[in-house]
């Protein structure tokens, strides 16, 4: 789950301000599963650490696109060690805080700091075996504007760490393009971190392709499709446009 958050005016100041309504040059579909930049689906288990998996899932892909090397980064390190940045381990967190921590502390690979779905004392392993991203390799982050065009344009470059409102029905998803009547009662709430990895159209219905962290037996082998598009000014189906965070990597 996500640490309670509202995208307020202060956070919106960090969002890109240029107009994002020109979708003329966007391809009809994007699917990063086809590009060998995504690890096998992971499973957060009985721990509210979706935010950590959202952060690493997008960051792993960005690094792979930039370097040609796909790492599996340590969600457990973020769970254990980013509390000083506002995260609460298995009790929730948020992705920009995870990127802020990674910028200043680096992050190990999962093989060095393995996941155990619990809250533990932070283990400082980078000094012993710096096999992940070193301090400064992530040099910041920014928030996307809350529009379909902004997310679709960003997805042309890399997967994106985002949040949504996951209702009870979402847990039962198995196939198709997800929509939920219940999400209209969510207001601007978001409670689940995921990774946007593409978009397309199925049976005439536009969708986003998302990566979840509930294991490969859930949904479409761990992925799901959710309705794309809506009225101007809304935040997408189940608030998928409410919070979209992109880490920046040093050149």
Image (tube, rainbow, N blue to C red):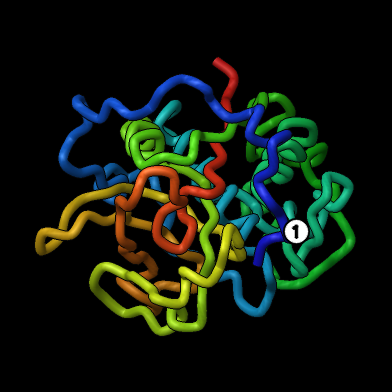
Near-viewer residue (202 or 135)? 202
- Residue 162 is situated, as x and y percent measured from the top left of the image, at 52, 50
Q: Quadrant of residue 108?
A: top right
> On the rendered structure, is 172 left or right of 75?
left
The structure residue drawn at horizontal position 36% and vertical position 49%, both measured from the top left corner, is 197
Q: Quadrant of residue 158?
A: top left
Q: Quadrant of the N terminus?
A: bottom right
- Residue 104 is situated, as x and y percent measured from the top left of the image, at 79, 31
What residue would you read off at disc 1?
A: 79
| Mark 1 Cα-neighbour bin, 10 Å: few <14, some 14–19, many ≥20 | many
Q: Is residue 53 above or below residue 160?
A: below
> On the rendered structure, is 200 left or right of 49?
left
Residue 15 seen from this side: yes
Near-viewer residue (125 or 151)? 151
The structure residue drawn at horizontal position 52% and vertical position 60%, both measured from the top left corner, is 164
Near-viewer residue (172 or 250)? 172
- Residue 123 is situated, as x and y percent measured from the top left of the image, at 85, 53
Q: Is residue 41 above or below residue 132?
A: below
């Amino acid at each position: 789950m996500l640490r309670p958050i509202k995208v307020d005016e202060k956070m919106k100041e960090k969002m890109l301000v240029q107009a994002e309504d020109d979708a003329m040059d966007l391809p009809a579909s994007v699917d990063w599963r086809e590009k060998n930049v995504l690890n096998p689906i992971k499973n957060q288990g009985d721990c509210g650490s979706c935010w950590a998996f959202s952060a690493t899932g997008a960051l792993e892909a960005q690094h792979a696109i930039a370097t040609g090397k796909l790492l599996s980064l340590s969600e457990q390190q973020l769970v254990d060690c980013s509390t000083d940045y506002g995260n609460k381990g298995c009790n929730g967190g948020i992705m920009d805080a995870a990127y802020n921590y990674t910028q200043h502390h680096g992050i190990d690979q999962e093989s060095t700091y393995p996941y155990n779905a619990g809250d533990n004392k932070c283990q400082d392993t980078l000094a012993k075996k710096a096999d992940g991203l070193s301090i400064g390799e992530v040099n910041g982050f920014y928030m996307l504007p809350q529009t379909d065009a902004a997310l679709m344009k960003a997805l042309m470059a890399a997967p994106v760490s985002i949040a949504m409102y996951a209702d009870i029905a979402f847990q039962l998803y198995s196939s198709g393009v997800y929509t939920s009547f219940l999400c209209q009662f969510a207001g601007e709430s978001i409670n689940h971190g995921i990774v946007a990895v593409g978009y397309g159209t199925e049976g005439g219905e536009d969708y986003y392709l998302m990566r979840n962290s509930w294991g490969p037996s859930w949904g479409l082998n761990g992925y799901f499709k959710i309705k794309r598009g809506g009225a101007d000014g809304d935040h997408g189906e189940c608030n998928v446009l409410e919070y979209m965070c992109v880490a920046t990597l040093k050149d």
